[in-house]
Amino acid sequence: MTNLFRNLVRTIMWVILSVETGKILLYIAVNVRDITRDDLSYGLIVKVLNLLLMYEIFITLISAVELRRIKLTYVVDTAIIFFIREMVVITFSEKTIETHIAIAFSLVVLSLGLLRVIGVRFSPKDVREHPGL
């Protein structure tokens, strides 16, 4: 059952990522004449970050099924990409960003970065060595 589910999730992942990559390439092809436009750059950056976000979510799901536990680094990577995406969306939108919101976003990303470094530095070497994990 686990192999079937893992293969199904991987197949769905690659189909969705391929479709999203095709949509990005189509977006570039349609707007190739206006490649220097700011909204094109903004749209392209957001689409690529969305693609990375979907990839990280699928990797987290596959890892959870295979290892029967959720790896902290995958969740933190997904959260970092999400917050960076949100900062890009706010930065490129016509809204002005308030100072306390910018500081809050920066602190969240910094905290997630530190959490990731700590998670990698002190990660268990092997699950069999740590039966409680």
Image (spheres, grey):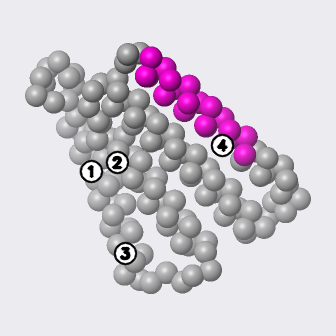
Identify the mark nearer the N-term, 2 or 4: 4
Identify the mark nearer the N-term, 3 or 1: 3
Residue under the image location 56 percent in, 67 percent down: 89
| Residue of label 1 | 115
Q: Among all residues in the image, which is located at the extreme front?
A: 1
Residue under the image location 53 percent in, 72 percent down: 90
Magenta stretch contains residue 15:
yes
Single out the mark in the foreground, 1 or 4. Answer: 4
Q: Amino acid at mark 2?
A: Val
Residue under the image location 72 percent in, 46 percent down: 23
Boundaries of the magenta span: 4-23
Q: Which mark is residue 69?
A: none
Q: Is residue 70 above or below residue 28?
A: above
Left or right of 126? Residue 57 is: right
C-alpha separation, residue under disc 3 versus residue under disc 4: 32 Å
The answer to the question of whether label 1 and label 2 lie on touching residues, with beta carbons closer than 8 A, is: yes
C-alpha separation, residue under disc 3 versus residue under disc 1: 18 Å
Identify the mark nearer the N-term, 3 or 2: 2
Q: Nearer the viewer, residue 118 or 4?
A: 4
Q: Amino acid at mark 1?
A: Leu
Label 2: few (<14), some or many (≥20) within 10 Å?
Answer: many
| Residue of label 2 | 76
| Residue of label 3 | 103
Left or right of 124? Residue 42 is: right
